[in-house]
Image (cartoon, grey):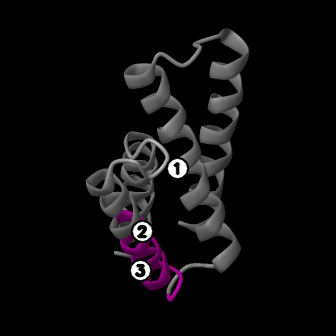
Amino acid sequence: MAWLLLFAAGAVEIVMAAALKAADGWTKPLPGAVGIVSALLSIFLLTYAIKQLPTGTAYAVWTGIGAVGVAIYGIAANGDTLSLPRLLCMGLVVLGVAGLRLIEA
């Protein structure tokens, strides 16, 4: 259950970043509010996950999910640059997160 909460926290982190991008420097209040609520929910879920998981592992997985997820979102929705080096680096993050997950399983 803790891993499920952790992955949910990472997914909500992606929503937060997308909402803050849509807030356009706080000129659009609704996406900004969604970003704040998403950030709080993500931290809330992370807090419950680390009750049962090692803190360092959980935090690394949470940030990895957020980082790769936001990078993919940026490529898909915002036209961010897609390059082989960028994909390789995201792959390394995924491998690291998967490795931590396997070690803690």
Magenta: main secondary structure equals helix
Residue at horizontal 65%, vertical 68%? 57
Residue span colored magenta: 38-51
Q: CA distance from mark 2 to mark 1?
A: 10 Å
In the rendered image, the residue lying farthest to the front is: 27
For disc 1, the marked residue is 66
Dot 1 amino acid type: Gly
Q: Does residue 101 appear left or right of residue 47 in this picture?
A: right
Residue 87 higher or lower than 35, as above or below: above
CB contact under 8 Å: marks 1 and 3: no
Q: Does residue 8 appear left or right of residue 26 in this picture?
A: left
Asked whether residue 19 is drawn in magenta, I would say no
CB contact under 8 Å: marks 2 and 3: yes
Between residue 91 and residue 33, name the one nearer to us.
Answer: 33
Check disc 1 and report its element: helix, strand or loop: helix
Residue at horizontal 36%, vertical 64%? 38
For disc 3, the marked residue is 44
Dot 3 amino acid type: Phe
The quarter of the picture where the N terminus appears is bottom left
CB contact under 8 Å: marks 2 and 1: yes
Q: Which mark is residue 81?
A: none
Residue at horizontal 52%, vertical 49%? 65
For disc 2, the marked residue is 42
Q: CA distance from mark 2 to mark 3?
A: 5 Å
Dot 2 amino acid type: Ser
